[in-house]
Structures are given as structure tokens and as C-alpha cells.
Image: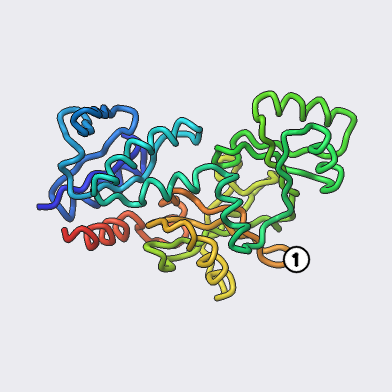
Amino acid sequence: MKKIGVVGIPGGWSSEKLADAVAERTGFRLLVDPGALRLDLPSGRILFGEVELNSLDGLIIKKIGKYYSPDLLDRLEVFRFLSGQGLPIFSNPLNIIRVLDRLTCTITLQLANIPMPPLTITEDVDVALDAVALYGEAVFKPLYSTKARGMIVLRPDEDTRAIIEDYKAEHRIMYIQKKIDLNGRDLGVVFLGGQYLTTYARTTRNDSWNTTTASGGKYQPYDPPEEIIALARKAQAPFGLDFTCVDVVETVDGLRVFEVSAFGGFRGIQEASGIDAAQHYADYVCGKVGA
């Protein structure tokens, strides 16, 4: 019997679902809370309660924390240590580190010539003010966030400078993206082991500027043309993630990519496509470790 653990949030829907799927195949169930680990460097052991993670046959990182923050990079270092000792981890912690920070992800996408909305990165309030004027409407995005948390939309106004100054007090490096018309929809294009799995749409049902479920967005099925799949495949390729979702939007100027997800979401896939991503992911990992 192979012992494969799942790193995630106890009680979290997707984390529990993946742990169940792995247990169905292996007879072993372990959901590891990443905030409850002990790394003992003299011995090289990493403990979760009485379980020594070094003794496992593999680990799947489904979630590394409830909310994105720089602290998650430090949590991932513990798993990078395990990976460096030879434990198979899906996705590789170093690859997750490269995509967790929005700016790091963006630079990788730009170097791969992936089309994205116009963007300004700056620490200067005057430059940020100029960017808002240039774009007409701009979205200020924290470097660590999901579901549009902490994002604000600004237009040229007499109060804009003061708002930017307040924003900069919390976010030294400002990530400023031109607000583009989503036409009420963006897409999540899902890959497992680099192979296309499915696509779902997120659609708005109110006047929100974004399509996230936190803002009332809904998941819907979507059958994309090959052009969208090809762009998303190219976007996710440099990161080497075992399971990921690429956010794509169709604009009047053509396709644009917002980001590549560090973990990918199960709920949107199931609600829109009826596909149980946890089952597919468990099959994939078990095949890799010979379970």
C-alpha cells in the first residue's frame, strides 16, 4: 500500500475531497495542515503530529493556506526541503513558488510572449497616477491574492492620488493593470500533467467589474475553440505544474491571459463540467508513484 498525503485545509471542500479520492485508491488517508508541521533540521525529519512525512511515498499540495500571502512562500520551503530529499510532491514546491507571487507569474508569462492586458509595475505614486490617466480605468492588484481580494479599481479623479498613497502604504510595489471589458465572462482552462482537461466559464450576474464567485459570479460550461486551448497550454507550460488553471479572457483586441493558478480550483470544474477533478488528480498521482 502506497502512502500519499494531501496538503490542504482541514474542513476545506477541495482538500477533503482530494484526500478522500486518494484514500479510495490507496487505503491511506492523510490531510496535512501546513500550519501544523515541525521541521527538525538536525535529523532532517518533518513531522505532522506523529506522522513523519519523509516516510510517505508522495504528497499532493492542494492548498498551502486559506489566503495568499508571502508567508506561504516560507511554508513551501519546508516542502521544498522534502522534495530535495527525494519525496515526489505534486506540484513541485519550487514550481509553486514561481507562480504564487503575481509579479513573478506575470514576468514568466511576458518572457514567454503570452498576451496580457496592459500593465504598469511601480513603487512611485506619480507613475501610478500617470498609469491611471493613461488607462482610463485601472485595477490595482496585490501581489498575493485570489478571488479579487484587496483589488481596487481607480479612474482619474481629484481623490485618486490620495487613494494611491493609502494603497501604497500597504503595497509597496504596485501592480496596475488596465481594466478591460470582460463582456461578463472569463474562462478557466484546466490542465493536468500538462494535458488539457476541461474549460469552464465564470460569468457575472450583477454589475461587478470581476467574475469571481465572491462577487456573485457563476460557473458555466464552455466548449472553447482550439485557439484558446493552445494559448492556455503555452501559458502554463513554463511553470511545470501538475494541476493548474489558466485564466483567459476574450476581448475586442483578441485573447488575453490574466494569470496561471498555483493550485487550480475543483469546484468550478465540477459545477460547470460535471468532472470530478479530485478523482482525475488522484489517478494521475497514483500512476506517477506506482500506487
**Residue found at x 19% / y 40%:** 54
Along the line of sight, the residue nearer the viewer: 166 or 204: 166
Residue for badge 1: 253
Which corner quadrant of the image does residue 288 belong to?
A: bottom left
Q: In the displayed structure, does residue 269 sit left or right of residue 224? A: left
Q: Is residue 288 above or below residue 45?
A: below
Residue at the (69%, 23%) spot, across then down: 169
In the displayed structure, 113 sits above or below 84; it is: below
Residue furthest right in the image: 158
Quadrant for the C terminus in the image = bottom left
In the image, residue 229 lies at what x, y percent?
Answer: 53, 70
Residue depicted at x 76% and y 44%: 138
Q: Between residue 158 and residue 185, name the one nearer to us.
A: 158
Tell me where residue 16 appears, x and y as whole percent: 30, 42
Asked if residue 83 lies left or right of residue 158, the reply is left
126 vs 176, nearest the viewer: 126
Amino acid type for the residue under numbered disc 1: Asp
In this view, the residue farthest toward the front is: 42
Q: Residue at x 20, y 58 (%)?
A: 289
Residue 39 placement (x, y as % from top left): 26, 29
